[in-house]
Image: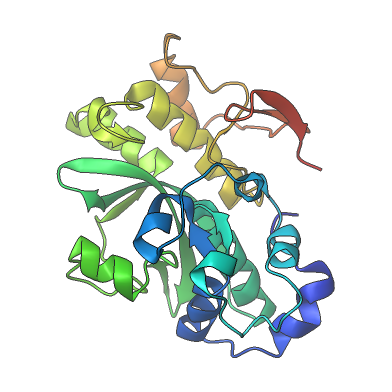
């Protein structure tokens, strides 16, 4: 289970359990690789970006108390998915119903839906969307006009919602992806559909984990099948092993 706390369970239970406090804790432990230079940390390709499990991410943060924020250079270099998964794990430890969502955010690049992960948590009778990656520095740099702990509807689309927007509303598939000039298009959104449904089902894979039926950039996309998948009409199974395309290696999820 990706959100298992393991040996850190007792320490997490001793932390404040409200959303804002948990997000502050997580931001003091993790550093997004794409933002590292903004914090004075040299860019690189660290092995820590491939850590899947919350327990492993917290292990990598060292033995100091979890509530003690690390200097940026001492944080675990990772990506948005890890901020989300660790936040979900800590919220659940404090009795809050929460889950990870994989999809696209509209607030990183004008006119483009960027590949991203967020947290959904129960807030009364609604699912509230929170972005635990966005701290004060990033909020200012992005000039956000909303609270990242309560992302307004329409600023983030989960994978299936992005697919439906393309298929039924005529949205440009190349306005969704990792970057407009590199990885984008219908095939990319199809992969996000599968990752999001897996995450909702409790298997929060890495953003670059791939498995059948995800298409590659040069593969034809079976749009009728993905219509069914996005609608929840065709069940999916996450295999025991996936291809980590960033490493170019097949890796176990267990």
Q: Quadrant of the N terminus?
A: bottom right
Quadrant of the rendered image containing residue 115:
top left
- Where in the figure is residue 158, as x and y percent of width and height? 40, 47
Name the colouring of the figure.
rainbow
In this rendering, the answer to whether 171 lies above or below 71 is: above
In this rendering, the answer to whether 243 lies above or below 199 is: above
Q: Quadrant of the C terminus?
A: top right
- Where in the figure is residue 190, as x and y percent of width and height? 43, 28
In-image side of 249 versus 129 (left or right): right
71 and 111: which is toward the camera: 71
The answer, for residue 151, to whether it is visible in the render is no
Quadrant of the rendered image containing residue 40:
bottom left
The answer, for residue 77, to whether it is visible in the render is yes
- Where in the figure is residue 197, as x and y percent of width and height? 54, 42
202 and 175: which is toward the camera: 175
Residue at image location 68% in from the left, 33% down from the top = 237
In-image side of 126 versus 168 (left or right): right
- Where in the figure is residue 166, as x and y percent of width and height? 26, 30
Residue at image location 68% in from the left, 49% down from the top = 52
In-image side of 227 versus 250 (left or right): left
Residue at image location 75% in from the left, 83% down from the top = 11
Residue at image location 41% in from the left, 41% down from the top = 159
- Number of labels in the image equals 0
């Amino acid at each position: 289970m990706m959100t298992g706390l393991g040996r850190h369970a007792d320490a997490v239970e001793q932390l404040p359990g409200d959303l804002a406090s948990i997000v502050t804790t997580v931001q003091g432990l993790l550093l997004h690789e794409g933002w590292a230079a903004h914090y004075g940390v040299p860019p690189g390709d660290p092995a820590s970006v491939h850590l899947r499990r919350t327990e492993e991410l917290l292990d990598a943060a060292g033995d100091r108390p979890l509530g003690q924020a690390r200097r940026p250079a001492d944080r675990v270099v990772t990506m948005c998915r890890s901020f989300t998964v660790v936040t979900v794990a800590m919220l659940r430890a404090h009795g809050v119903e929460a889950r990870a969502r994989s999809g696209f955010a509209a607030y990183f690049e004008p006119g483009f839906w960027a590949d991203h992960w967020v947290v959904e948590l129960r807030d009364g009778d609604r699912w509230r969307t929170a972005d635990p990656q966005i701290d004060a520095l990033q909020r200012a740099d992005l000039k956000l006009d909303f609270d990242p702990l309560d992302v307004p509807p329409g600023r983030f689309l989960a994978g299936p919602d992005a697919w439906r927007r393309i298929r039924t509303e005529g949205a440009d598939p190349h306005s969704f992806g990792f970057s407009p000039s590199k990885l984008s298009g219908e095939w990319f959104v199809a992969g996000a559909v599968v990752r999001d449904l897996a995450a909702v089902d409790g298997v929060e894979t890495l953003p670059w984990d791939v498995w059948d039926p995800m298409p590659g950039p040069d593969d034809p996309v079976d749009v009728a099948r993905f219509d069914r998948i996005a609608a929840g009409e065709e069940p999916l199974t996450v295999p025991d092993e996936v291809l980590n395309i960033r490493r170019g290696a097949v890796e176990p999820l267990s």
